[in-house]
Amino acid sequence: MINRMENLVSTGKGDIELAGVAKSYDGNTYAVDGINLKIPDGAYCCLLGPSGCGKSTILRMIAGHEDPSVGEILIGGEDVVGLDPVERRTAMMFQSYALFPHLSVRDNIEFALKVRGIPKGLRDDKVDAMIEKVQLGEFANRLPAQLSGGQQQRVALARAAITEPRVLLLDEPLSALDEHLRIRMRAELSRMQRDLGITFIHVTHTQLEAIALADMVVVMDQGRIRQAATAPEVYAKPKDRYVAEFIGGQNVLTGKIGQLNGSQATLAGSMFSDIRIPLDTRRRLEEGQPLDIAIRRDDIDLLRPGNAGVPEGSTSISGSVIGVEYQGNFVKVMLQAGGEEEFVAYVPERRFFEDALSVGDHVLAVWQIDHAHLLA
Ligand code: ADP
């Protein structure tokens, strides 16, 4: 999925724009507020955030199951507020799949065409093509109860896609599946989105799911968007502490700026005294100013003190090992570095076992100055 955003050539039919959108269910509190978002046609977009942050509300407003209290929603440049889902040409796939238990796979997929009054001959052609696309040929006459979870998901997807929507909306589509199946179906969703070539908007509270699938990740917090960017950008350049902590894989350090000089500055905090940080030319910083920075856990190298010392261009903090967890291809080493916050390094497995660390060992956690990322 990496960088596919740049290659998306919008035909304008399924691009979505939310402008100044807010929704209150009770007239008092806002489930979402101040939402401005543009999703290009053909993108795979994930709305990511903890439960209750407003993801499903946004999904339902795009689908046409709710209307915003204020603001505009445009699909393909057309204001769709007040239109029903059929008029908007959106389709929704639910977590429970909501398949008709007494209808066969084929009849489930055909249903939406029947209610739209499409003639039998045309219906059959479309259903045949869709069944082939989702590879359900050998199951066409089975009932939903005779299918695996993954196969049921394919039927649900086919049933939503058969109406040729401009946008397909998926509400936690993988959460009912076990871990193994979830990863397989994740790949399948991605493949089907590419085959269908339509905009997918997928709601999830699982970071890895969003990172793996999305061209565009929208990180939400309490009804607002914190960051909307490509997956690599959200992961490598989280905008603020919230995004860095929610996406994970980062150490977030809080401190105050010490000396500023040229392209670098020093930062002092409760668990370190003078680490060096890169300066961002687009941002004015002042001595004494509080600042959060993030350093990826896999950018940290652990050295025994007294050995070679900190390499040129790197900076470090010292700490002691309080936990070691084997994770297969890497080892998670947890450090106590003086402050409240834990500091974690992901050390590649081979490197770790060259000189295995144990709980209680003193280490220097070292990283390249340029690898620290300044947060808002
Ligand atoms: P998420 O999908 O991120 O879990 P929701 O969009 O479902 O979040 O909910 C956002 C907020 O709006 C929550 O506080 C929730 O309780 C409230 N909410 C959602 N749906 C309704 C509704 N139909 N009526 C009243 N409040 C609702």
Image: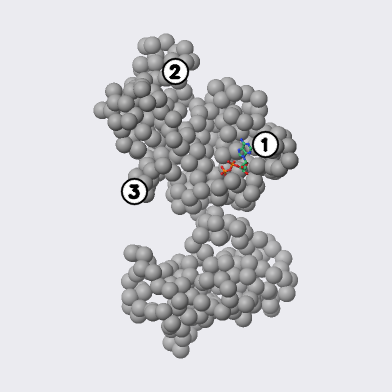
Give the residue at mark 3: 180
Q: How crowded is mark 3: few (under 14 residues within 10 Å), some or many (20 or more)?
A: few
Judging from the image, what secondary structure is the residue with disc 2 in?
helix
Looking at numbered disc 2 in the image, what kind of residue is underneath it?
A: Leu
Judging from the image, what secondary structure is the residue with disc 1 in?
loop
Q: Residues within 10 Å of mark 1 (few under 14, many from 20)?
A: few
Q: Nearer the viewer, mark 2 or mark 1?
A: 1
Q: Residues within 10 Å of mark 2 (few under 14, many from 20)?
A: some
274 vs 139: above or below: below
Q: Measure the C-alpha gap from mark 1 to mark 3.
A: 37 Å
Does the Cβ of the disc 1 residue fall within 8 Å of ligand 1?
Answer: yes
Marking on residue 113: 2
Determine the residue positioned at 34% across, 29% down.
144
Q: Is residue 373 left or right of residue 152?
A: right
Q: Which of marks 1 and 3 is in front?
A: 1
Marking on residue 25: 1
